[in-house]
Image (spheres, rainbow, N blue to C red):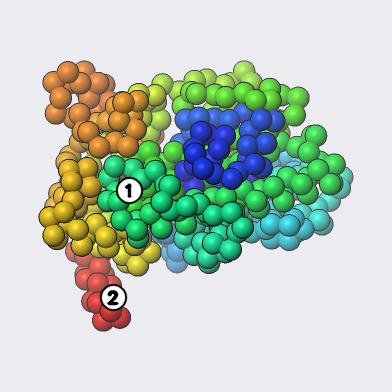
Amino acid sequence: IITEDMSPELTCYGYPGMNTPNLDRLASQGVRFSRAFSTSPVCSATRSAFQTGMYQTSIGAHHHRSHRDDGYRLPDGVRLVTHRLRDAGYYTIGVRKGLPVTGVKTDFNFFVDAPFEGDDFSDRPKDRPFFAQVHLRESHKGPAWKEARQQARLVDPAKVELPPYYPDDPVVRDEFANYLDAVNLADAKVGQILDALEREKLAGNTLVFFMGDHGRCLLRGKQWLYTAGVQVPMIMRWPGVARPGTVVDGLVLSLDMTATTLYAAGVPLPTPFHGRPLVGPQARPREFVVTARDRCDMTLDRIRSVRTARYNYIRNFMPERPYTQFNNYIETSYPTLGVLKKLHAKGKLNREQALFMQPRKLPEELYDVTSDPHEVNNLAASPSHEAVLKEARQRLEDWMRETADQGGVPEPYPPEEMDRRVRAAQAAAQGKK
């Protein structure tokens, strides 16, 4: 079960004021991973990764919604997890029918033939094991946010705990509260799916994963490598294997869900493969995880992050491009940005709130996420953290080389062409206003 644009704002993760009984129940029946991360803070890149078990930067799928019309295919030896499972005898379903809540998203940055065999859960062959994917869009900005406001129990905007980089403004509180309402709505839909498994007597012998594709769709979340953009909820219920009520605090990646799925099906992991099984003889703890952001929509950028249990190191390869370079999706869908711009023009933002409005990004950022969970105190220039910074730099350099990071290779059109497109979009947006 994959939700879109969701950070771990759930009761079972200790987030206050939420109404998530179904995911709380799922966590009590299995394993909750407290430090799970996506490989990217945007949908098409992270899906391209966890559907193959490979970093999107290694397979040429790192630019958001790229290769839409050029027929680009996966490199030799890289395959979808569904194709590997199909070869092992599994019937693969991208669920659109047959469950009370249905939907599927094949938003990949490559062309692939028939990612799933079927779309109706009810019509699956009863003599074959199955693999099903259900995608929930409730927490993604759009019609579901309006549906979320129709629930009987709503989050009170006045009680929302805003991060320090947001100004305390009614518009900001309303947007954040609406997101939390959408998370609660997603929980209700998860409950319907789990109930259906119970009715069909499948719950006792079915491995269930719940995961967000990337972090929340709020400013400084989605599209960014801060915690709010890449930390996701991940829960695994595996009857007879996963001890109920377990909490794992080690670092894990979305790719590890893919590896665990193959392990559960008895499919050997190929080489190379970037995911690691979460259980079994091949399970190995991670000292750090790397996340990556490249072009998102019309916004050119290249950013990499190395995260340990304590520190988040971010390298901005294009520091001359500000956080607020024009992005039509962000401009039209994130009311908080408008509030920040208005207050910034009036000189009414404090230090933390003004961070996102700087004309340039710093080349490097380093945050102690244990003492600074909102990542507002950059330690990159701190003499006492020089050793930490040096180690993070080396880990990133090694990772880029070992995984053949393609982020430094330009797309077919040059940056000036993208800038021309941005200017055209800005003019169109201004015309609509």
- Name the N-terminal-most of marks 1 and 2: 1
Q: Amino acid at mark 1?
A: Arg
> Does residue 287 appear left or right of residue 283 in this picture?
left
Most foreground residue, 192 or 42: 192
Q: Quadrant of residue 129?
A: top right
Q: CA distance from mark 1 to mark 2?
A: 22 Å
In this view of the protein, which residue sits in the foreground, 335 or 68? Answer: 335
Amino acid beneath label 2 = Ala
Residue carrying label 2: 429
Q: Is 233 rendered above or below residue 122?
A: above
User: Depth check: 379 or 170 in front?
Assistant: 170
Farthest-out residue, right: 127
Residue pictured at 73% horizontal, 39% vertical: 88
- Where residue 396 appears, as percent x and y from the top left, is 30, 30
Q: Secondary structure at mark 2?
A: helix
Q: Work out whether 192 lies above or below 236.
A: below
Q: Residue at x 72, y 51 (%)?
A: 192
- What residue do we see at 65% from left, 25% from top? 245
* Residue 360 as seen in the image, left or right of residue 69: left
Residue topped by disc 1 = 220
Residue 202, horizontal then vertical, whole percent: 81, 41
Give the residue displayed 62% in from the left and 28% down from the top. Answer: 31
